Image: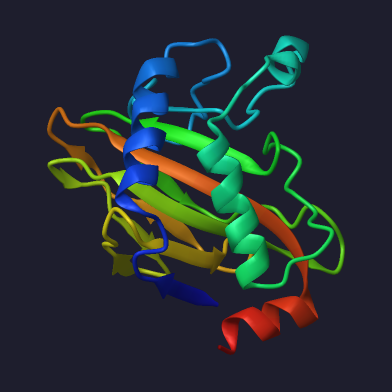
Amino acid sequence: MIRVIKQFLSQKEVKILNEWTLKHYEEPFFEDPRMDLYCEKTRLTTRIVTDNPPSFHHNITYPKEAFNIQKRIQTKFKITNPVYPPPFRYGIVNGIGFENGTICLHRDPQYFSNTVTVHCNFITQKPISGGITVIEEKEYNIDERDMLMYAVSEVTHRVTQTIGTKERILWCYGFCLEKNKIQEIFAQ
């Protein structure tokens, strides 16, 4: 239940998404998801990670390109009436990882019965080294315009340590998909 689609994003989209992240990551809608077992605040994300009511109400104005990418994913995979994971505002999460940060081994929740949680990930800025997604102990070192799509509620995954002062920028599009749609997408 893993797919890599090469060059899904344009260079212009990558530039716009990275500029947006670097401009906004200090805003209060970016929070520490506490997924680095050893260091705090080595990663910040727009994913709702607390039950703190203000977290749910922060206004995020993602660039229009982020929504265009979401529509392109939905069109490519014929996802109609999408259901997004609850912690994803608008079905999108933006994250930034800093030097020495990792993401611990985990499996995402199945938010709704009879669905599988799927992420479509784009590493739009790679660090100097490291920051590689590892799924079921296999590394996926994708290029900056590629999409890594996988069933995060079905497989364990983590991210290796980010090395160097260049941040790792992630844009993630989440969906809760019925099992027949999962078979259709990952059988291609």
As displayed, is residue 173 above or below residue 87? below
Q: Outermost residue, bottom direction?
A: 187
Picture residue at 61% right of the left edge, 51% below the top: 70
Location of residue 139 in the rendering, given as x and y in whole percent from the top left corner: 29, 66
- Which of these two is toward me, 18 or 29? 18
**How many numbered discs, if any?**
0
143 on left or right of 148: left
Res 79 → quadrant: bottom right
Q: Quadrant of the N terminus?
A: bottom right
- Quadrant housing residue 164: top left
Quadrant in which the C terminus is drawn? bottom right
Q: Residue at x 78, y 82 (%)?
A: 180
- 48 is higher (above) or lower (below) than 59: below
Q: Can the viewer see residue 80 in this picture? A: yes
Q: Is residue 92 left or right of residue 81?
A: left
Q: Note whether residue 37 is visible.
A: no
- Residue displayed at 61% across by 23% down: 61
Q: Residue 154 at what x, y percent from top left?
A: 62, 68
User: Quick check: 29 left or right of 161?
Assistant: right
Residue 174: image location, x then y, percent: 63, 52
Residue 23 position within the rendered picture, expressed as x and y whole percent measured from the top left: 38, 17
What residue is at 65 percent from the left and 28 percent from the top? 48
Q: How is the image coloured?
A: rainbow
In the image: residue 81, left or right of residue 140: right
